[in-house]
Image (cartoon, rainbow, N blue to C red):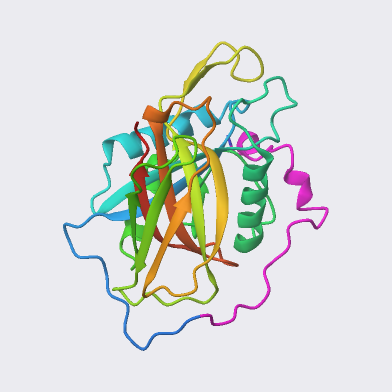
Amino acid sequence: MWSHLFRSPIVYAATAGLLVGLAVLHPWQKSNAAPSHQPLGNPQPVIVELFTSEGCSSCPPADALLKRLSEQQPVEGAQVIALEEHVDYWNNLGWADPFSSNAFSQRQAEYARSFGSGSVYTPQMIVDGQFELVGSRGTQARGTIQKAAALPKLEVRLTPIPNSAPEKPGVEVRIANPNAVQLRHAPELWVAITETNLQSDVKAGENSGEVLKHAAVVRSLRNAGTVQDLSSYQERVNLFLDSKWKKENLGVVVFVAEKDSHKIIGVGTATLRP
């Protein structure tokens, strides 16, 4: 099992010295108030990223696990927000994943640098940008999500802006810091567009003959810049949609992450139904 999970086509990058450790951390924002935990009964949003590929035979169980976690919400105290990110480094091994992007491969490599692991693999699950595990391990995933849900977060609220252009709708993003979240790096705003109800009838490669069903697949992910003031942030964010995506299945996930550590410290969601 392990030899298969870790035979990523770009795992050689570690030995080439491509993935290196991070520099020493420096304070970004300090608070004298002690961080508080999310009140009981109020589910804490937790982002679960899955780096996966339709060309990897170990990935379908992880895809199915993420789908269950996001649709059934079985973790007490947590609201699981799925981000299924398809890497492209399996594409030359028989099947070109239609949802893959080199941007997701690069994002996974950035995580490898921050974790100091020196390699990437599929399926890899990363919870709130700070905990990583093999993506098909259900018991470990639920425990890790529950652990992440106990940590304090920013409040991120999204409000769709009415009368926006259909191809470029907007959301108003408001951020507050009632839990006195302390940062060690500059906070960055990230915007993801996801699409649900996607599946593929795989014709070649390791999953040939399989019909693969997915959780919320990330269609686009972009950095919207640094958040200058966490205590009173309020900005409009424009969303750029592809006409091929089904709008009734689209959602937007906006999250705040520390620039260098990639730790996710706040997240908000909204649907983009017509």
Residue 157, picture quadrant: bottom left
Q: Position of residue 207 (x, y in %)?
A: 59, 19
The magenta region covers 2-28
Indicate whether 254 appears above or below 207: below
Residue nearer the viewer, 246 or 107: 246
Q: Quadrant of the C terminus?
A: top left
Q: Position of residue 208 (x, y in %)?
A: 60, 14
Q: Position of residue 271 (x, y in %)?
A: 34, 40
**Is residue 260 toward the left or the right of residue 42 in the image?**
right
**Is residue 148 toward the left or the right of residue 15 in the image?**
left
Q: Is residue 143 visible?
A: no
Q: Is residue 96 magenta?
A: no
- Which residue is most to the right? 16
Q: Position of residue 42 (x, y in %)?
A: 20, 57
**Is residue 65 toward the left or the right of residue 93 in the image?**
left
Residue nearer the viewer, 136 or 153: 153
Residue 20, picture quadrant: bottom right
Q: Residue at x 44, y 84 (%)?
A: 30
Q: Is residue 20 magenta?
A: yes
Query: In terms of secondary structure, what is the magenta stretch mainly?
Result: loop
Q: Is residue 121 visible?
A: yes
Q: Residue at x 39, y 40 (%)?
A: 138
Indicate whether 179 appears above or below 225: below
Q: Tag count in the figure?
A: 0
